[in-house]
Amino acid sequence: MDAHARLLTADGMPIPGLYASGGAAIGISGHGAGGYLAGNGLLPALGLAFLAAEDASQRFAERNK
């Protein structure tokens, strides 16, 4: 995954139109149930969703000029 929440191929190229967010993208609480902090998944989900939406809307606008 890159800074725009785009999923990348093994060689580092973005996969067109494919984004990740929330627990599907990253975990910041640690491994297993012992590392889970209540509500901690909300921030990555919202933050990455914002980055993905911003990137997707910019690409859409550039394509439709």
Image: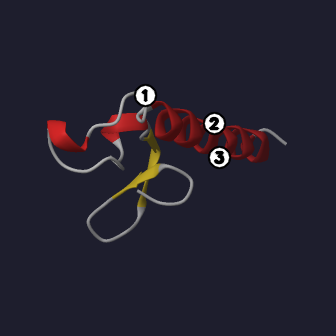
* Residue 29 percent coordinates (x, y): 32, 47
Q: Are marks 1 and 2 in contact (CB under 8 Å)?
A: no
Q: Is residue 30 left or right of residue 25?
A: left
Q: Are marks 3 and 2 in contact (CB under 8 Å)?
A: yes
| Type of amino acid under label 1 | Gly
Q: Which mark is residue 55?
A: 3
Secondary-structure class at tag 2: helix
Q: Earlier in the sequence, mark 1 or mark 3?
A: 1
Residue type, label 2: Ala
Which residue was labeled with disc 2? 53
Could you tell me residue 10's position as x and y percent?
26, 65
Q: Secondary structure at mark 1?
A: loop
**Residue assigned mark 1:** 39
Image position of 18 (left or right of 57): left
- Give the residue displayed 37% in from the left and 28% down from the top: 38
How many other residues sit within 10 Å of disc 1, few (<14), some (14-19) or many (≥20)?
few
> Going by the image, does 56 lie left or right of 12?
right
- Could you say which disc has been placed on residue 21 in the image? none
Determine the residue positioned at 56% across, 33% down: 46
Residue drawn at (63%, 36%) of the image: 53
Which colour scheme appears in the figure? Answer: secondary structure
| Label 1 – label 2 distance at C-alpha | 22 Å
